[in-house]
């Protein structure tokens, strides 16, 4: 709160910072400021992944910073819950009110009646898992399993490889075969695209595996469009092909892997024909892919997050990540796999949180928020503290989340940048700074990177940063001392290895090891206990309901035959920036499915199942496979006719590994709106 300077004295300047939003690329961003206001945002050119440009989403980030929906001051609910009517109050009043409620609830029901709720609204290292975590730990609140995304991929990558660093974007130019599996870089992680294009100019073959014909799928040499939830069958069929046809790299497996026999046994039932039938893909094309993968090197698989979001998602990711091991694709530049690189530098919250031990309190899986708010007891949830997250837009089982937020006896705090769908249901609203107004540390999970996020402008309105507000609250509750964000920054950077800390603070970015381009099994090896790939980890086998690589059948019924998917869009980062969407979102549907239902382009439709109903227009397109419909991820309630989004149709069931969300297990029917 101490760094106010009169904006008029600033003139024009450009601040180099980094984007901490939940996107793999972690761009270096140049923010140009004139008279204290942002006039332009674009990419820094000295970052080998950013290369001078950023996505259209963040290029217009100033529309969020200065937009009509921006929260400018603390406020306390005045009208009925959900009416969105609030009275402006001071920070002292708001925080004293929250502290009083915390004390009351803790004394009456125990601190586990308080549920902190956060996710990657800003993925920076200061905005979560610092002073917030210390506050919750010291109070002994319920703990949150933050598994809405990346939990199955994380479990699989950890189990098989101990999260070994992956192939860098720049090294895709060396590949002869590139496989994009369950990922659409045109909407998320765009900076890989120029390298894919360069590789193709060099003669590389591109394979895309996605139920949609994405822009890259249209350019691909081969596009497989498996039915959602069947990627595990496709991947196991490739394994069987490699083993049976003598393409498995036995020498590599003997030296570097365990569990190959168990994987082979599980793959054995998946002939090309059976997998093709299960996945609804052409058997000849699947076999072509198997041949191509067996015979081409360097071959790299970009494994995305689309294939994890179903009942078989963890096993699917494990089977995909196992392919370069069985196929012998490592040890060359441009060969292997890319998954998340978030752990490559060894920078994690444990470095600064270990001296505040985590109590063994109740764990609530965030994907079950609606159920938790309505049904959990011993104790019931009496306070929900939401930050970096818009759960009404992003969590499964949306109607129960909504019902829970409406509970008269629930005290809800929302600490946010803008007036989100969830914020409307708050009892107390607290305004948060955005990444152009605060310090932070951005860690990439595509490129290996760690960068300093620097404020380019003063906080808008009375907004404050997360570390300041949580430490202020801790002081009011007598469980900690208030800290400025720069003090928090220096404290956590001080826990990093000295060379990393020094470079981060002096240069604003850390030089990654291996120049950011490790060759798997040359520069980096599995970080498993025995430094070998475990192709059949016992923990994953025990966790998956049908065992690792097991297949659970499709949840479709005659009543609800269509698979609904909700992929990332080019307009939002998850739900962030959803306030800027102007038009109603459209359900994408194949013309043959539309014809069966008598639907035409732009018709208003009901998309429904037993959990809820979404009303929106339909767009007919051959870019989605028949039997599957698609509505964008991260929509806000205003983006449909009736205020429900795809998450109103998503069950709160969990993935086979990691407790992840099964967004793509929604099965629905679609009808013309007005026809029942
Ligand atoms: S959202 Fe991704 S592509 Fe866009 S600026 Fe941020 S890191 Fe870069």
Image: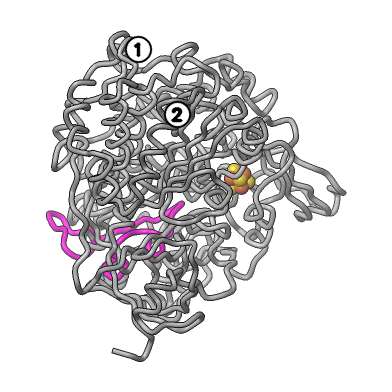
Asked if the magenta segment contains residue 393, the reply would be: yes
Q: Residue furthest front?
A: 284
Q: Residue furthest bottom?
A: 674
For label 2, the SS is strand
* Label 1 crowd bin: few (<14), some (14–19), many (20+), radius 10 Å: some
Residue 113 appears at what percent x and percent y?
Answer: 22, 54
Residue count near mark 2 (Cα–Cα under 10 Å), binned few <14, some 14–19, many ≥20: many
Residue highlighted by disc 2: 337
Q: Is residue 441 visible?
A: yes
Left/right placement of residue 309 relative to residue 9 reads left
Relative to 466, 661 lies left or right: left
Quarter residue 641 falls in: bottom left
- For the point 43% across and 53% down, the residue is 387
Q: Which residue is mark 1?
A: 252
What is the magenta range?
Answer: 373-401
Give the camera-side residue of 564 and 638. Answer: 564
Q: Quadrant of ligand 1?
A: top right
Q: Which mark is residue 548?
A: none
At a point 65% along the width and 48% down the height, the residue shown is 437
Q: Considering the image in quadrants, where does the C terminus appear? A: bottom left
Query: Residue at the location (22% across, 56% down)?
Result: 554
């Amino acid at each position: 709160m101490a760094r106010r300077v009169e904006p008029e004295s600033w003139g024009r300047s450009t601040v180099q910072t980094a984007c901490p939003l939940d996107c793999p690329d972690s761009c270096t961003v140049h923010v140009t400021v004139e008279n204290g206001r942002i006039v332009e945002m674009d990419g820094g050119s000295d970052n080998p992944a950013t290369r001078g440009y950023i996505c259209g989403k963040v290029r217009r980030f100033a529309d969020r910073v200065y937009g009509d929906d921006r929260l400018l001051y603390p406020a306390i609910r005045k009208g009925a819950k959900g009416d969105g009517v609030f009275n402006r109050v001071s920070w002292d009043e708001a925080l004293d009110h929250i502290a009083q409620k915390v004390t009351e609830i803790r004394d009456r029901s125990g601190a586990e009646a308080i549920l902190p709720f956060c996710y990657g609204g800003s993925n920076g290292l200061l905005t979560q898992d610092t002073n917030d975590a210390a506050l919750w730990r010291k109070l002994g609140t319920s703990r949150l399993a933050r598994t809405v995304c990346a939990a199955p991929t994380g479990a699989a990558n950890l189990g098989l490889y101990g999260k070994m660093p992956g192939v860098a974007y720049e090294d895709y130019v060396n590949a002869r075969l590139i496989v994009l599996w369950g990922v659409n870089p045109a909407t998320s992680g765009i900076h890989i695209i120029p390298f894919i294009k360069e590789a193709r100019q060099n003669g590389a073959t591109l394979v895309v595996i996605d139920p949609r014909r994405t822009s890259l799928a249209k350019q691909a040499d081969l596009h497989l469009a498996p039915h959602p939830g069947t990627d595990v069958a496709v991947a196991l069929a490739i394994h069987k092909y490699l083993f049976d046809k003598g393409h498995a790299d036995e020498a590599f497996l003997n030296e570097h892997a365990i569990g190959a026999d168990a994987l082979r046994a599980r793959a054995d039932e998946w002939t090309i024909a059976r997998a093709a039938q299960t996945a609804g893909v052409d058997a000849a094309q699947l076999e072509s892919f198997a041949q191509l993968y067996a015979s081409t090197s360097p071959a790299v698989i970009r494994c995305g997050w689309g294939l994890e979001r179903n009942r078989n998602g963890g096993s699917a990711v494990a089977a995909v990540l196992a392919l370069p091991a069985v196929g012998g694709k490592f040890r060359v530049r441009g060969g292997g796999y890319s998954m998340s690189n978030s752990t490559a530098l060894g920078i994690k919250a444990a470095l600064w949180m270990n001296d505040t031990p985590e109590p063994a309190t109740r764990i609530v899986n965030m994907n079950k928020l609606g159920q938790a708010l309505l049904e959990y007891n011993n104790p019931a949830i009496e306070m929900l503290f939401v930050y970096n997250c818009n759960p009404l837009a992003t969590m499964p089982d949306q109607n129960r989340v909504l019902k829970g937020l409406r509970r008269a006896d629930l005290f809800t705090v929302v600490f946010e940048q803008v007036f989100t769908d969830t914020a409307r249901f708050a009892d107390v609203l607290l305004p948060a700074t955005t990444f152009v107004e605060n310090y932070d540390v951005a860690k990439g999970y595509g490129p290996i990177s760690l960068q300093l996020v620097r404020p380019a402008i003063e906080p808008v309105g009375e907004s404050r940063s997360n570390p300041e507000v949580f430490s202020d609250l801790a002081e009011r509750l007598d469980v900690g001392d208030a800290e400025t964000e720069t003090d928090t920054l220096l404290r956590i950077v001080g826990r990093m290895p000295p060379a990393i800390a020094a470079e981060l603070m002096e240069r604003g970015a850390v030089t990654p090891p291996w120049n950011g381009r490790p060759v798997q099994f040359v520069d980096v090896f599995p970080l498993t206990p025995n430094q070998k790939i475990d192709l059949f980890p016992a923990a994953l086998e025990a966790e998956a309901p049908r065992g690792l690589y097991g297949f659970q059948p499709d949840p479709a019924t005659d009543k609800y035959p269509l698979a609904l998917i909700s992929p990332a869009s080019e307009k939002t980062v998850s739900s962030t920036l959803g306030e800027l969407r102007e038009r109603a979102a459209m359900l994408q549907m194949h013309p043959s499915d539309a014809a069966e239902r008598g639907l035409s382009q732009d018709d208003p439709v009901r998309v429904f199942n037993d959990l809820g109903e979404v009303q929106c227009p339909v767009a007919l397109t051959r870019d989605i496979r028949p039997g599957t419909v698609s509505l964008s991820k991260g929509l806000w309630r205003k983006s449909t006719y009736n205020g429900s989004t795809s998450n109103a149709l998503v069950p709160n069931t969990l993935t086979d590994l990691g407790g992840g969300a099964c967004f793509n297990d929604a099965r629905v029917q679609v009808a013309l709106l007005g026809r029942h």
